[in-house]
Image (tube, rainbow, N blue to C red):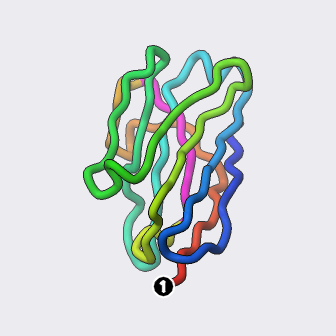
Amino acid sequence: QLKESGGGLVQAGASLNLSCTSSEDTFNRYILGWFRQRPGKEREFVATMTWSSGTAVAGSVRGRFTISRDNTKNTLYLQMNNLEPEDTAVYYCAASTTFLAREEHTYEYWGQGTQVTVSS
């Protein structure tokens, strides 16, 4: 139901824009968010956005990452600027019924993930 794209290998300082596409039903019924799992670490919250464009963003990426959505395309985006090697991770899109949820267990559906690798 959720499919991520847009990952890749970039140098530090570069930008990437991740996309998460879903069915119209999923997009309208659930609140979507982004998580990431860095090598050797647990999956962590990155950002989430409600239908009314309310957002929550992790402190570690605030100011560099921006979450947005296109309701006409049933797509959630994560614009990542000024990437750092520490941003290297698999990025996941997930769906929740909880507003602005940061906890992984509150998300019911997950995509397969897209790999982002940032070289120094």
Camera-side residue: 102 or 9?
9
- Number of numbered discs visible in the structure rendering: 1
* 101 on left or right of 115: left
Q: Decide: few, some or many residues near mark 1? Use Cα within 10 Å; few <14, some 14-19, many ≥20.
A: few
Q: Which structural element holds mark 1?
A: loop
Camera-side residue: 110 or 36?
36
Magenta segment: does it hold 92?
Answer: yes
Would you place residue 60 above or below residue 99 in this image? below
Residue at position x 48%, y 70% in the image: 13
Residue at position x 40%, y 74% in the image: 86
Residue 29 drawn at (x, y percent)? 57, 17
Residue 70 drawn at (x, y percent)? 64, 25
* 113 on left or right of 65: right
Q: Residue at the bottom extreme?
A: 120
* 100 on left or right of 90: left
Q: Quadrant of residue 56?
A: top left
Residue at position x 49%, y 72% in the image: 88
Q: Quadrant of residue 14?
A: bottom right
Camera-side residue: 73 or 90?
73
**Label 1 is placed on what type of residue?**
Ser
Q: Which residues are magenta?
A: 90-97
Residue 79 drawn at (x, y percent)? 53, 47
Residue denoted by label 1: 120
Camera-side residue: 9 or 35?
9
Q: Main structural element of the magenta stretch: helix, strand or loop?
A: strand
Q: Can you say which quadrant of the picture contains the N terminus? A: top right
* 114 on left or right of 15: right
Q: Residue at the left extreme?
A: 59
Would you place residue 22 above or below residue 92 in this image? above
